[in-house]
Amino acid sequence: MILKFTQNFLLIFLCVSSVHAQDSYKRNDNADVQHYRFDLALNDDSNEISGQTYITVNFEKVTDTFAIDLTGKSEGFGMELLEVLENDEKASYSYKNNKVLIKPSTNGGQIRTYSLKYKGIPEKGLVIDATKYGQRSFFGDNWPNLARHWLACVDHPYDKASVEFNITAPEHYDVVATGKKIEESSIGNGFKLTRYNEPAPVATKVMTIGVTKFASRYLGSFGDIEVSAWVYPENRLEGFADFEEATKILEYFTTKIGPYSYAKLANMQAKTKWGGLENAGTISYKETSITGNKEIQGLMAHEIAHQWFGNSATENSWNHVWLSEGFATYFTILYLEEVHGNERRKKELAIDKEEIFEYYLENPSPIVDLTIKDPKKVLSRNTYQKGGWVLNMLRHKLGDEIFWKGIRSYYAAYQNSNVMSVDFQNEMEKVSGEDLQEFFDQWLYVKGYPELKWDWKYVKGKLTISVKQLQKHHTFKFLIEFGIVNGDKIRIEAVQVTEKTTKFEIELEDSPDKVEIDPEVWLLYQEK
Ligand SMILES: [Zn+2]
């Protein structure tokens, strides 16, 4: 998603490094959710919803407890659990601390379907509020772990499942949700049933619904994926104009990365606390982002890039969220480079660099920061901007051809699946034949970046460039380019830095007019 950084992030001094460590969510052992069916009844008389969730689970082995998240009643909000069935029989369960703990009647190797009936007013997750035009609306806004406020589910991205929404709502609303629309029927008494089904596995963080009065339009398609816009009727023309580019973005990413994973690509004007939220196949864009002035090119590219990275290839642990946000950040830059040229890439990366420096002063922490336990705290300039920068440096290190080959191979291996940073590293190593351990270690698990003092001098046919790393905590190893400028000509020399202080000599006939450091913007460093 896109957000504004207004939070104060905690100072983090510890640096623990373990590539396989998981966040603190207690996972179900030997149980894998296969499918969710969410039946929801919405009305205009109150904000109380009635829900029935059907969860189909494969128990790989004998299992003591299968835990389902559902936020219980507290101070007027939350869900009252009415019934829990296992394959239509009363289930053995307890309900405490917002967890439904079921004792499965299986010795393993069996599939069970649980049905949980509940009702209540969701405090979060499902935003029931008036749009900016005063129209009543219901919008799913789950990221990172708010689905449990209105859906009974295993509310962590490690366990993805196909999903079906069966929504009963007053007939005057238009209903959109994750998946392909499979039914829209009037059921009497002024209500209608709308059903959506998504066969691809989806993480709860990116499941959504939108229920309000919408204007909707088919915008185009790429392959068999239809692209549409769902906007407030008052913003009909502005919204359709703003979202028009979505088809072109879908085409670019599909061609460059691999097949799109979901049933459709709907772009929805929504009440969301984010600038945009990458809900799988049904992206939410903040209601005020729609202007008709086509100012959301970068925002759309970011959220659409997430359909591959974050949604389809999903971080297995919240601490590796850069696989989602860093990728969405850099793939936005790649799209902008494709449309506007290389200067745009350089400009975007230069802006991101300044933000990384500013953030580092207050938060000297690495991208993969295992001290963070709360998923609400994993979003930062480290996981977005610095994560994006890591991909820029990797691209430069490997060259465009190998970089893209690696990206395609990584996506092919982990489409509709879960990943850790080491899985990405392994794929890039396989494709490039290079050992990238040091590269990933220093950029993902070490805080900061090279802080460089440098100069050059020319004496008798020899250009000497000296580079000194000033940061004390780590000696970075990196490739750096210098531009040797003579008139309007620039010659680029790339050199490898492995020490605190390094001197390079280049034979040159004439003294250069000037020497530039990293003229093509490939290295994350700060000049001191
Ligand atoms: Zn994002």
Image (spheres, rainbow, N blue to C red):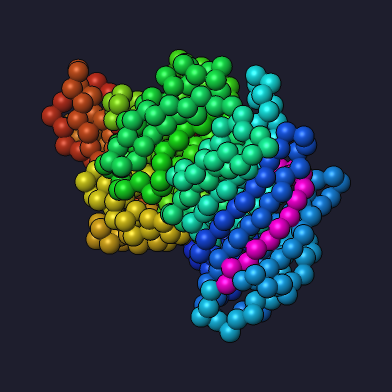
- Asked whether 462 falls inside the magenta stretch, the response is no
At x 85% / y 44%, what residue is drawn? 76
Q: Which residues are magenta?
A: 112-125
Image-based side of 456 in relation to 262, left or right: left
* Residue 383 seen: no
Q: Position of residue 107 (x, y in %)?
A: 58, 84
Q: Position of residue 45 (x, y in %)?
A: 77, 34
Which residue in the rendered view is the most extreme toward the left? 509
Count of all numbered marks drawn on residues in the image: 0
Q: Position of residue 166 (x, y in %)?
A: 57, 48
Comparing 43 with 319, the one in front is 43
At x 61% / y 42%, what residue is drawn? 187
Q: Relative to 159, say whether 224 is above or below.
A: above
At x 53% / y 18%, what residue is drawn? 235
Q: Relative to 371, say whether 224 is above or below.
A: above
Comparing 104 with 420, the one in front is 104
At x 65% / y 52%, what residue is drawn? 151
Image-based side of 401 in relation to 272, left or right: left
